[in-house]
Each structure stands twice: as C-alpha cells, then as structure tokens.
Amino acid sequence: MANIVAIGVQWGDEGKGKIVDLLAPEVDVVARFQGGPNAGHTLVIGDKKTVLHLVPSGILHDNTLCLIGNGTVVAPETIVEEMNTLIRAGIPVAQRLKISDRCQLILPYHRALDVAREIAKGKAKIGTTGRGIGPAYEDKTARRGIRLIDLTSNDLDAKISENLEWTNFLLTKYFKTDAVSRADVDEVLDLARERLLPLMADVSLILQERHKAGDSMLFEGAQGTMLDVDFGTYPFVTSSNTVSGAAMAGLGIGPAMIDEVLGICKAYTTRVGAGPFPTELYNAEGMNDAAGKHLAEKGQEFGATTGRPRRTGWFDAVVVRHAVRVAGVTGLAVTKLDVLDGLSEVKLCVAYERNGEYLQSIPADAGVLNECTPVYETLPGWAENTFGLTDMAQLPKNAKTLLDRIEEVCGCPVTMLSTGPDREHICRL
Ligand code: GDP
Ligand code: IMO
Ligand code: MG
C-alpha cells in the first residue's frame, strides 16, 4: 500500500481511530506525529470498544509497528495507563510500540497551568481538554521543555527546579491557585523512567530503515484542520499543526515518503470546545434545532476524552475545501453516513454570506467567521437504513447524490465511506 497521512479535516473526532485501525493491517508501521492526550480515538471491534489517547490506532494488530513521533506531547501517566489497559486486554504493547527520544513530556505543572488559565479566562475560555497541551508546546518552543531523552541526563534535576519555580510563581501569584509539588513531578518522572525509557528510540531512523526495506506506512493525525494552530479558527485551536505537513516535522521524514493524504470527515459537522462554527444547529447552551438534535443523539456525540457533549451542525464544504487545499488532501473518507438515516432533508453549506458578500474560503479572523452565515444547498434525505453497509452500490439514491455533491463542492474524491462504528462497517472504492 502507498504511504498515507490520515488526518481530520473538520474540528476533530471525525473517526480517525476507526479508519486508521481498519487500514493498519495493510501497512507495516502506524505513527502519530502531533498532538497528545487531548486526542481520543475510538476503535470498535464487535462488542469491544477501545479509546486511545496517545498509543497509535494500529496497536491492536500483530504485525504493525506503532511509533510516537517527536512532534507529539506525551503525558507519562496517561500513556502508561493506556498501556496497562491494553496489556490487560492481552495486547503486548511493549513489543509493538516505540516512542521518540525527542518527544516532549507533559508534566503535572503543564496541566495545572492549562486548567488555571481556562478558569481565569471565564466565559472567554477556549474550552481546552485540560490535558496540559498548550503549556507543553509552549515550553517546547521556549526551549525549556523536558524531552524523553532528558530522563537520562544529569541536568534534569536543575531543569525541573527552574521550570517548577517559574510555573509555581505563575500559579500562586498570578492565578492565585495551588502550587504543584516537586514530589508529584518526580513521581511522574520515575514512572516515565521505568515504563517509557525501555521504549525510547530514534523514530526518524526507524522510519528511514523501514522505508528502504519497502515497508508501507500510515501516519495518524490527531484533532482536525480547523483546530490547526495556523489554519484553524485561531485562537480557538489546539497548540500544534494538524495538517499533513506536520507529519514530516513531527516524525523526521521528507515529503517523498508521503504518497497520499486521506482527509477524514463526518457526513455532518461537530465541534467540542468554544469558537466559531458557522453551520451549528445544536448545543448544550440552548441551540435546539431538531435536525441538530438528531445528529447529536443518533451520532452519540460526546467527547471521547472529556465526555463533553459535542456541538452539531450540517456538513460545511467551505471547511472541508479549506482542508483539502491547506493539507493537500487526495481522498476523503466520509464517516457516520448512517447517522443521517431518517432525516427528511440534508443540508450542505457551500459558501458563507457576510454583510451581503459571499465568501468561498475560510477567513483568517475568527471574529469574521463568527459573523458568517451559511449558504445552504438542500438535498432530499432517505428513510432507508445505511448502518453497516459495505457496498456503495447498495446505498440509497439520495445518499449517493449527497456524496457526489460532497465530492464536487470539496473538489476531492470520496474514497472511503463509513457506515457504523465497527471496523467492518466500511465501503471502499
Ligand atoms: P477520532 O478522534 O477522529 O478518532 O473520533 P472519535 O473516536 O473521537 O469519535 C468518533 C465516534 O464515532 C466514535 O465513537 C466512533 O466509534 C464513532 N464512529 C466512527 N465512524 C462511525 C460511523 O461511520 N458511524 C457511526 N455511527 N459511528 C462511527
Ligand atoms: P481528536 O484527535 C476534538 C479541542 C478542544 C479545544 C481545543 C484546544 O480526538 O480528534 P487543547 O486541549 O488541545 O488545548 O484544546 O481543541 N480538541 C479536540 N476536539 N477532538 C480532539 O482530538 C481534540 N483535541 C483538542 O476541545 O476546543
Ligand atoms: Mg476524538
């Protein structure tokens, strides 16, 4: 198989875990390249559900090497807990997983800062996952981050003291909240030494060797293009680049190692956390459109990491078109088509309108995006059941029409269609 980057092209939770898991047996390596435990990727196999935050979604397969690249931020307690759960389920994680020596660690003071900042922002909060993602990436860029390799260094003690002193100053004096204790940090570092150092490797080197040997690879993105720190709804975004380009810097590979970019999107749109969402219909704050409620309830739209209810709305082709361009998407995997079953009509946003003008692309200013109203095309829905379908030829005519229109307005072919949460619920072209 070709080397593929699989990314979300909306606001995350598009079904990346499911798609990566089902493609994994066809590749030799699955690698995560950005994000951290803010991600929640769900894998459903029969009656067993696995939610992964840091471990790549290829881990359930015997012969797939799973790698965590330097572009990710790793919380030792989270990944160890995840590994323990997998081990209890009979998955020999340690034999299948390697973690880059250059990975940044998320430590308890990052989480404390993330949470304190959100509380201080009050109504203006971003609605982060509270996992310390932003502060960890800030430390990386500020060149004071702690990397996995630092656990083997004699300077670690002094670095931690300095970071903790600075963060505790902010926490207690500025945010007026509790300091983080050195003992809490040391406990996490000890755990990382014990459980993560044995998995430490030069991931870029492994990828180069595997590539030379003719192995194929799947690079698994987290979040989605609209949460990208440059191309998303800034500042209501995550702190990493989520576009396909991030795979190169986040793993230490060149562009020639990437053949295809698979953009994963739902047949509608969801978002969790704050920020603009032009096609929004339904949320916990009182938007209560009946179709939006159908999407939330039938789609069981609750965050896989935080359990928060997701905001729901119609498919936004302006969003997906933007992702197709900025991430060079070569094929779309449309998920959760089955959730649209039973709706009398289905809408597709093809442009925005603002002050009497039409916009065909995403404006850089989140404030401007907030003032945009969607221009919809309305298509007839279908009463038939598409749940679990595995053959495109069996799709109701109106579902096929919707997919054709998605291809046209997004300027990208649909190459996969997901019709249920299970690995088996898939139509491939
Ligand atoms: P990810 O973060 O992109 O991996 O997506 P999440 O796992 O956070 O959220 C996707 C949710 O939709 C999970 O509960 C999946 O089990 C579920 N899911 C994925 N594909 C389908 C589908 O085609 N139909 C339905 N009904 N559920 C799906
Ligand atoms: P997966 O990989 C959906 C959102 C948060 C918040 C913003 C910033 O499962 O698709 P952060 O904690 O990253 O600083 O939060 O980004 N967010 C996600 N939303 N899916 C995710 O990951 C997300 N990861 C972060 O809700 O709005
Ligand atoms: Mg998710």
Image: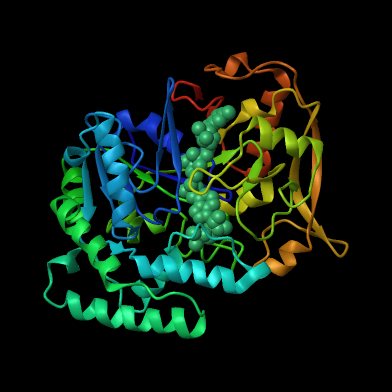
Q: Quadrant of the N terminus?
A: top left
Please give left or right for residue 427 compared with residue 354 in the image: left
Is residue 59 depicted above or below 208 in this figure?
Answer: above
Image coords of residue 212 (percent x, y):
17, 45
Q: Is residue 225 visible?
A: no
Q: Pick the residue in front: 236 or 406.
A: 236
Instruction: Give percent across and percent down for residue 62.
Output: 23, 29
The residue closer to the viewer here, 349 or 415, is 349
Q: Is residue 347 left or right of residue 362?
A: right
Asked whether residue 87 appears in the rendered view, the answer is yes
User: Extreme right residue here?
Assistant: 356
Numbered-mark total: 0
Q: Is residue 299 left or right of residue 169?
A: right
Residue lying at 15% horizontally and 47% vertically, measured from the top left: 209
Expressed as whole percent of the image width and height from the top left, the position of residue 95 reads 16, 38
Residue shown at the point (22%, 43%) measured from the top left: 97
The residue shown at (48%, 76%) is 177
Q: Position of residue 191 (x, y in %)?
A: 21, 56
Residue 96 appears in which quarter of the rendering? top left
